[in-house]
Image (cartoon, grey):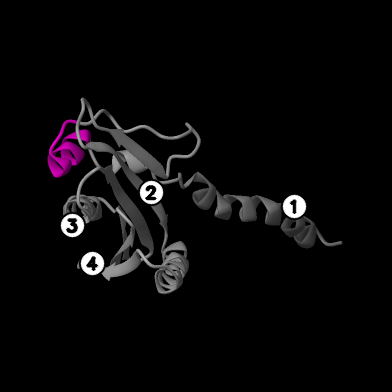
C-alpha cells in the first residue's frame, strides 16, 4: 500500500467525524426558551410559573402551570418536525372524519396551521418551513376562547422559530 493510500485510509475516519460534528453538536430545541412566562400569562390572562420539562432530557415539550384557582390549568408547547406535522395532520383528518365531536379547523398562522378539536379539548398545530409545533391551553373554557389564546401563543412562538 502506498504512503498516500495509507494516509488517506487513516485520515478518512477523522474527516468523516469532523464533518459530522456540527450535526451532533446541534442541540435539541428547548421549548421553554421559545415562550416566556410573561408571554404565556398575557395570552391566557393569568400568571403562570416558569416553564418546565416533563423530564430533563426531553426539552421539546414545555409546560407552564397557571397559579391560583384559575380556569386555565396548564399550557404546553411541543416542538416537532414538519414531517411529524404532516403525518399528524393526516391522522387528525381521519379521526375527525370517523368521530363525532372531533374536527379539524383551519388556523391562519404560519405556512399551515389547524386546530384539532375533540369535544371540549383543542390544540393548535402550526408548520412554518421545516419546523412545527403544537400549543395547547388546558382550561375549563369554551373552545373558541382556548383557540384565541393558542393563536396568540403560536404567533409569539413563530417570532423565535
For marks 4 and 2, give the CA distance.
17 Å
SS class, disc 2: strand
The reply to whether the magenta stretch includes residue 45 is yes
- Find residue 46 and report its horizontal and vertical position in percent: 15, 34
The image quarter containing residue 37 is top left
In front of the other: 19 or 81: 81
Label 1: state its secondary structure. helix
Q: How many marks?
A: 4
Q: Residue at coordinates 28% horizontally, 66% vertically from top-left? A: 113
Crowd around label 2: few <14 · some 14–19 · many ≥20 (10 Å): some
Q: Residue furthest right?
A: 1
Residue where numbered disc 1 is placed: 10
Left or right: residue 139 versus residue 43 is right
Q: Which mark lies nearer to you, 1 or 2?
A: 2
The residue singled out by tag 2 in the image is 78
The residue pinned by badge 4 equals 107
Amino acid at each position: 500500500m502506498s504512503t498516500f493510500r495509507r494516509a488517506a485510509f487513516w485520515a478518512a475516519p477523522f474527516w468523516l467525524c469532523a464533518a459530522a460534528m456540527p450535526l451532533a453538536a446541534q442541540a435539541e430545541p428547548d421549548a421553554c426558551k421559545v415562550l416566556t412566562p410573561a408571554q404565556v400569562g398575557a395570552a391566557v390572562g393569568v400568571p403562570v410559573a416558569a416553564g418546565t420539562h416533563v423530564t430533563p432530557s426531553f426539552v421539546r415539550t414545555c409546560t407552564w402551570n397557571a397559579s391560583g384557582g384559575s380556569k386555565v390549568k396548564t399550557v404546553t408547547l411541543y416542538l416537532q418536525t414538519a414531517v411529524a406535522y404532516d403525518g399528524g395532520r393526516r391522522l387528525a383528518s381521519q379521526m375527525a372524519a370517523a368521530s363525532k365531536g372531533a374536527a379539524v379547523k383551519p388556523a391562519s398562522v404560519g405556512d399551515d396551521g389547524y386546530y384539532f378539536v375533540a369535544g371540549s379539548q383543542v390544540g393548535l398545530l402550526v408548520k412554518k418551513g421545516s419546523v412545527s409545533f403544537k400549543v395547547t391551553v388546558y382550561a375549563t373554557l369554551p373552545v373558541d376562547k382556548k383557540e384565541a389564546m393558542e393563536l396568540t401563543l403560536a404567533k409569539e412562538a413563530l417570532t423565535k422559530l
